Amino acid sequence: MIQRTKPLISVVVPAYNEQDNLPELYRRVTDVFEKLDVDLELLIIDDASSDGTLNWLRKTGREDRRLRFVSFSRNFGHQAGVTAGLQHAMGDAVVVIDADLQDPPEVLPQMIQRWREGYQIVMGQRIQREGDPLAKRLFAWGYYRVLARLSKVKIPVDGGDFCLMDRVVVDTLNRLPERNRYVRGLRAWVGFRQTNQPFQRHARFKGEPKYNFFKSLSLAMDGLVSFSYLPLRLATYVGLAAGAMALIMVVLVLYWRFFTNAPLVGYAILVTTFLCIASVQLLTIGIMGEYVGRIYDEVKGRPHYIVKETNQDLDASKS
């Protein structure tokens, strides 16, 4: 095992088609660490990029041994990239940061200082979002507050994957077997001593965002389904309410039929009622399907990702 005199900080960067951003990220991260009394491991996870990302990683990795990379055999997604980074990182503490520079590397000295003060998880907390459309900001604001209200786990609002975690936290996360990983939720679930580090989220440095509305919605669903049973209970409550309404309608129809002379008309009302009941049934089936689908993923037991290439045998270097 390599003996170190200074702490090793691993900076994990999931990247997909980020050839325009990685050189600037590399420059800013290394500049920050030049002023810190710690060693750096810059670990970039290439999620099967189709641009020049992998070529840049190969070239820069040969020039600077602090930079290591893991390249996937196909695109497995951002959360798989974060998972791979946590599993391959060797640092005494591990930082997760996006490649688009919306999470500024200049915040890392404050996060490392909080870690040295004894905090085992230092979460980046966004106090302002530059460059994000109003609709996205409103969606994120509402989602985090709904999740915080519904989840049994206290998940901090306005947080993301940007954080610093102590080695004991990383090892604990790596032992969790679930497939549909919502890392920021799992990070809260494991506990330990946690604090927030406020920062101003910047606009994307270059290129187009990789998370569109549907990908963001899918991630939001993963978080909601993974940490709350309320959607299932909501389906039950809606079903009970629909049943009560149907019972009331039966009583009213019988009353009109036997105790009044009013003709039984109102096909529009009947059709509307049927459509409402059908929509409730489909909604309930859809909610159950979200949970059943995740159970199916867990039962299959497939790996989170498949590694195609690395510039070093990281697993062997741990031993």
Image: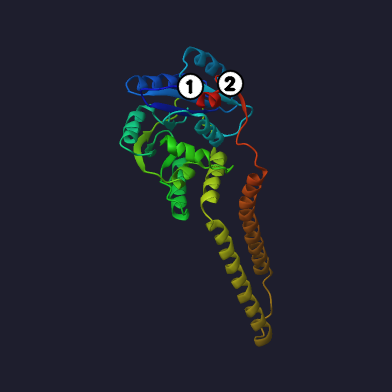
* In the image, residue 88 above or below residue 137: above
- Mark 1 or 2, nearer chain start: 1
Q: Please indicate, yes or no, whether residue 61 appears anywhere in the rendered image.
A: yes
Q: Residues within 10 Å of mark 2 (few under 14, many from 20)?
A: few
Q: Please indicate, yes or no, whether residue 207 appears anywhere in the rendered image.
A: no
Colouring used for the render: rainbow
Q: Which residue is mark 1?
A: 22
Count of numbered labels shown in the rendering: 2
Residue 24: x and y in percent read 43, 20
Answer whether labels 1 and 2 touch (C-beta < 8 Å).
Answer: no
Measuring 53% from the left and 13% from the top, which residue is drawn there? 59
Amino acid at the residue labelled 1 = Leu
Q: Which residue is mark 2?
A: 51
214 or 294, which is in the foreground?
A: 294
Residue 31: x and y in percent read 36, 19
Residue 274: x and y in percent read 67, 65
Q: Quadrant of residue 51?
A: top right
Q: Residues within 10 Å of mark 1 (few under 14, many from 20)?
A: many
Amino acid at the residue labelled 2 = Asp
Image mark for residue 218: none
Measuring 35% from the left and 19% from the top, which residue is drawn there? 34
Per the model, the C-alpha gap separating discs 1 and 2 is: 12 Å
Element assignment for label 2 = loop
In the rendered image, the residue lying farthest to the bottom is 259
* In the image, residue 122 above or below residue 189: above
Element assignment for label 1 = helix
Drawn side of residue 218 relative to residue 2, left or right: right
152 or 241, which is in the foreground?
A: 152
Measuring 46% from the left and 37% from the top, which residue is drawn there? 170
Residue 86: x and y in percent read 50, 33
